[in-house]
Amino acid sequence: MLINSELLCKCLQSLDRRERQRALNDLLEFAVSPENKQEDVIQIYDETYLYILKCYSDKYESCRELASSVVTEFFRRLPKNDYYLQYIVSTLHSRIGQKELIEESEEIRLLLLTQLDSLIDKFRAEKPEKDSDYLLKCYDEIVDILLKELRDNYPSAQRAACSCIRTLAEATPSFHFRAEALVKPLLPLLHHKHSMNRVNAIDTLGIIALHILTNGDCITQIITEISPLLMDSMPLVRKECGKTGCRLIMELRDRYSYFPRLLPLILCCLNDDTPDVRDYIQNLWVKCGQQYYEENENELSKKEIVDDMPLRYPDDIKRPSLGCRALVQRSLKIIQLVLRETTDWKEEVRLHSLKLLWQIILHAEVMTAVHVLDIFPVVAKACADPDKKVEKEALKCAELMGMLMIYKEWFSSCLGTLGDNPKLGYLKAFHSMFSAATRCSCREDVQEIARILHQRDFSHSLNPEYQMYLLKFVDVLIDAQEKTESISEAMENLSFADIEDKTEQYLYHIAIKVAAISYDSDIESLKSFGREILLKLGKNDEKVVMKLHEKYLNSVLETFDCLDADNDGNSEPILLLHGVICLCGFQHDYLDNLKKLILIVWNHGSSDAKVKILSAISIGMMSWDKTINTDLETSSGLLRNFVEEVIQPHLVWKAGASAEGLRTLATATLCSMAQGAQKEVPAILAELAKTFRELVEDNCAATRVYALRSLMNIGPIALEDLRALGYAVIQRLDDPSVEVRDWAARSITKICVNENVMEKTGQNSVNAYMTDIFSSLFLHFEGPELKLRNTIKSSLVILGKAHSEVFVEAYNKAYAIAGASIKEELKEIKMLVVP
């Protein structure tokens, strides 16, 4: 049904907004109605389009919106005609393609862009020839509109502009003429706060790159600008990066030269945290590999025949197809770009770079060895990264290299790098590679690693994490050594015996030093692991471990240096010596060397260093009878010399708090020695009787206690020494310290019950001496302390049985003057002594 076009045109020019709206609504209804024939639609449009297009600039937004809708609906029915197209595009250009802002309504701008998109789609070229390209005549105006709208502040308009670009790229073979001009305004959208704008920008730039024919730098810029979005927080953005990478790697002109730059866009997505991204890009990546295989089938089909799976391929990883691997392997110069990024100051960049490196190693497999000298130091540095996520990825890379590369192709070069860099990261990286490697059974390799690790720069570290990894490496080397035993048995025993002894010595050096340094560590797992490794090295037999000490500890002690400096208690040389003494104790074979090192500390070390070593000696002495495997005479001589040279100098009184502390510890060492060397100690302590007389009167209560406890193990002494020491001890019954009084009451029995003295000395002299002792004991028995009274009671019984005559005489005197409350207890004591 026709409408009155003349009337409509008149209404469209009316000053009354309602008239214009009514006319536009009538036209919209006419254009939408399916009952109207195309000829009628064409006729009405021809008669009214100038007036409709004029409404695009109407001052009322509702009229402008209606006008746009009317034209859109008419164009759905109109045939392709470049005359119509040029008029409408020119109108759109005047509204939204000018440098200044003409159309102020965001919604209208979006509506006009949507209309432009539908026009481009309608007038797309059906053939590649230029004659069929309707869009060519108005192409520049379309591009100007898009350039303007890409910079629009309205996010939806920006997305619509991106959609128009993608449609235009498909619709016209002339797109490449100004495709490059669209790149610059698109780049800022990559950093837009709306994720969908970033997604659209990536997709659009990827399509534009396909149509840039000559400017390779522009394509490189596009790829470079897109790459950082692989670390975007939104999975959709990362997915679009991978999708664009796959599109370009399959469709880009001269794409082979861009493989190194395009591969990161894909490989990073294969390690994405979101399963949907990984799976989607994995499917596209398989297609990329298939296409590359088909393009290079002659070469790759031959390689496929000998394409064997590496022996230690990761169980949970599906091996990439030959085409995918070959595509990466021909682009290994990408490694240099990735390695540069792994040292970036941003943790996020380092993390993603290492994930990408892992994928490259996975695809490159044995070809990684070509670049191993470049990769290993960078991965090693990342293995000590303060960010634990980065460290974890670096260790994964090192492990994968060990699995996939041929062992002989990387071992020597990486070991040399490790030897030049005794750092935690290098140790971690090499440990991971060696542990994961499908290695040849070669004892020389194990020995060479052990030789490097036993050097001072490696084995003297105070870093607990470093120590732990060093022990882990020793554990791996012990296992590797055991695996090669069957091979060594099949060959000449002498040559392999030399290798085995040397390797065992190196491994022992590392294990004992780390265990020694970490002996006082607060990390219990490190301490226990160190002892476990020593035990494992000794075939889980403590006796074998002792044999290892006997065999190799002298060579370990020879490597101790810097002891002649003013070291404090926490310095590495002191910790090392302290740990060795505590762990190994004292054996005849290395006692002299150990003693020399201790004397160096006495001459040069600080006070707290001496305290540290004395405490170690105290611990070591407790196992003297277990570690000294000699006869009693030899053992006594060794211990006597050790006490004279090492311990006795600190027992002599010297002024100062430091000297007092050392004296206390030295006395405690005598006490420990009494427990660990029970057969040798009595005679040695007897020789120190004059020294003990001073120690029991020392100003420090702890020294007095240790001295009195040591006297419980003293042997026979001369009467002169006995008298002086006994009087000194009995005077301690008045000591301010409860513990000292108690031990004085106990130790007096050990001093005075001495049959050898009584045989060699006149009885009258002994009786006179014991009379004084009994008098003092009975005097202090009347004191108020119940604990001390019970101790004195026990001592009186023991001494009374040994000297009964003197006891009875002293008892009678004490009983005569004792109070009524004490007499019953005195009677009880006499009954125990003289029934």
Image (cartoon, rainbow, N blue to C red):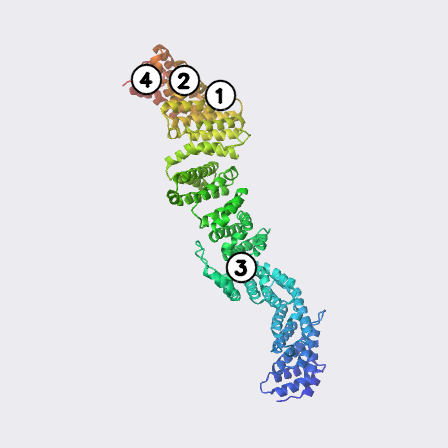
**Residue at the outermost left position:** 835
Per the image, the residue denoted by label 4 is: 802
Residue 70 at least partly seen: yes
Per the image, the residue denoted by label 3 is: 328
* Residue 114 point in image, percent of width and height: 62, 74
Task: Looking at the image, tell me whether mark 3 or mark 4 is earlier in sequence order.
Answer: 3
* 147 shown above or below 586: below
Label 2 vs label 1: CA separation? 19 Å
Residue 652 — which label?
Answer: 1
* 588 shown above or below 455: above
The type of residue carrying mark 1 is: Val
Label 3 vs label 1: CA separation? 77 Å
Task: Looking at the image, tell me whether mark 3 or mark 1 is earlier in sequence order.
Answer: 3
Q: Nearer the viewer, mark 3 or mark 1?
A: 3
Task: Looking at the image, tell me whether mark 4 or mark 1 is earlier in sequence order.
Answer: 1
Is 326 left or right of 758, judged from the image as shown?
right
Task: Looking at the image, tell me whether mark 2 or mark 3 is earlier in sequence order.
Answer: 3
The type of residue carrying mark 3 is: Val
The type of residue carrying mark 2 is: Gly
Per the image, the residue denoted by label 2 is: 726
Mark 4 is surrounded, within 10 Å at the Cα level, by few (under 14), some (14 to 19) or many (20 or more) other residues, namely some
Pointer 2 and pointer 1: residues touching (CB < 8 Å)? no
Q: Nearer the viewer, mark 3 or mark 4?
A: 3
Q: Secondary structure at mark 3?
A: helix
Pointer 3 and pointer 1: residues touching (CB < 8 Å)? no
Mark 1 is surrounded, within 10 Å at the Cα level, by few (under 14), some (14 to 19) or many (20 or more) other residues, namely some
Label 3 vs label 4: CA separation? 95 Å
Mark 3 is surrounded, within 10 Å at the Cα level, by few (under 14), some (14 to 19) or many (20 or more) other residues, namely many
